Image (cartoon, rainbow, N blue to C red):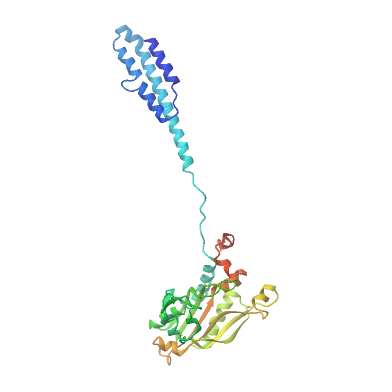
């Protein structure tokens, strides 16, 4: 019996356990019903009373030692597996959180200024039919904007909108007067992409329709906007212009000066930069939208957001806003 006990203990202590498979082999060899430890107990049952007294305690010690080796090996293997799993579950590369675009900040600032002036915000579809994009706005059939060279047509009567004036038409057609709204949004024109132009850009247009609206109302509204956005000391001027949907029409310039080389180039040596077009809504446009032009009048204006963003942030190339260069975009994360 003594030799059997010593042999089992020695074999158990020398048994190599470095994997779950080897641990299972150890269990099958020593601890199952037909294992070596249980065979000892079967031999133990054959002993007489004195033999059982002598070896009973020794057998329990053998069993405890073998079970301890099994338990310790099992815990080591579990710890090893957990460690490996932790390595596999480590997070990957940090995923950066996006932020709002610089153009969005400019649109928001403009919107807040006009909201303080009593304007609401209206939106509309970016794919428009000919009526809302051209005909209702008094564009003649031979106007260059209707050509394939200037507009992205989806089919003969459907195109990507060339201005957010189409939203103005939809508002006027609704028949809910008075109207005092701005229309921010993206528009599309078939233009060559350069430092100063793109095939898509952003506008904020405005429309005010009511009884007794005058050109002086238009000028005062735009003066207030410029003073809030560019500063109270900003010099402005109005120049006569032409748009099919307004009469009279004008363009508004702000004075940048010619002291810096960039301002000189931007203003072509004049010091003045055009920032918007405006005018009184043409009576024909009111009539097209079933508004009595003998009772109601109104004004409209449109600002190019991208150009104003270039002025605000000192950006020289319009394409910079849309190149997805993180070095540029990260400058606006904390605005």
Residue 52: percent from left, percent from top: 32, 10
> Would residue 313 appear left or right of 260 to someone viewing this image?
left
The answer to whether 13 is drawn above or below residue 257 in the figure is: above
In the rendered image, is residue 293 in sight? yes
Residue 59: percent from left, percent from top: 36, 15
Q: Quadrant of residue 43?
A: top left
Task: Identify the residue shown where x is 38% and y is 20%.
Answer: 64
Q: Name the outermost residue toward the right.
A: 259
Q: Say which of 224 and 59 sits in front.
A: 59
Task: Identify the residue shown where x is 32% and y is 15%.
Answer: 41
Task: Identify the residue shown where x is 59% and y is 60%.
Answer: 327
Residue 216: percent from left, percent from top: 54, 87
Q: Say which of 116 and 69 sits in front.
A: 69
Q: Quadrant of residue 129?
A: bottom left
Task: Identify the residue shown where x is 54% and y is 66%.
Answer: 322
Q: Say which of 263 and 136 sits in front.
A: 136
In the rendered image, is residue 176 in sight? no
């Amino acid at each position: 019996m003594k030799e059997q006990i010593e042999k089992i203990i020695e074999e158990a202590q020398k048994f190599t356990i470095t994997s779950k498979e080897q641990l299972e082999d150890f269990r099958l060899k020593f601890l199952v019903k037909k294992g070596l430890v249980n065979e000892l107990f079967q031999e133990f049952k054959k002993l007489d009373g004195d033999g059982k007294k002598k070896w009973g305690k020794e057998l329990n010690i053998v069993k405890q030692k073998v079970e301890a080796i099994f338990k310790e090996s099992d815990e080591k293997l579990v710890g090893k597996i957990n460690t490996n799993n932790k390595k596999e579950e480590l997070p990957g590369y940090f995923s950066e959180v996006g932020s709002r675009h610089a153009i969005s900040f400019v649109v928001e600032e403009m919107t807040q200024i006009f909201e303080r002036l009593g304007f609401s915000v209206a939106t509309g579809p970016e794919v428009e039919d000919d009526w809302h994009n051209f005909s209702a706005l008094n564009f003649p059939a031979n106007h260059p904007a209707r050509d394939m060279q200037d507009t992205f047509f989806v089919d003969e009567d459907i195109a990507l909108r060339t201005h957010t004036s189409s939203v103005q038409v939809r508002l006027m057609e609704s028949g809910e007067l008075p109207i005092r709204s701005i229309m921010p949004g993206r528009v599309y024109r078939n233009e060559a992409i350069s430092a100063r132009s793109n095939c898509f850009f952003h506008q904020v247009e405005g429309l005010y329709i009511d009884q007794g609206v005058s050109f002086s109302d238009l000028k005062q509204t735009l003066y207030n906007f410029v003073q809030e956005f560019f500063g109270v000391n900003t010099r402005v001027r109005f120049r006569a212009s032409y748009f099919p949907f307004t009469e009279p029409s004008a363009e508004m310039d702000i004075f940048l000066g010619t002291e810096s080389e960039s301002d000189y180039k931007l203003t072509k040596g004049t010091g003045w930069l055009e920032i918007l077009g405006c005018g009184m809504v043409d009576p024909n446009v009111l009539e097209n939208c079933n508004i009595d032009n003998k009772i109601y009048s109104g004004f409209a204006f449109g600002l190019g957001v991208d150009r104003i963003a270039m002025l605000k942030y000192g950006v020289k190339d319009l394409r910079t806003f849309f190149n997805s260069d993180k070095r540029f975009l990260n400058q606006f994360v904390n605005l």
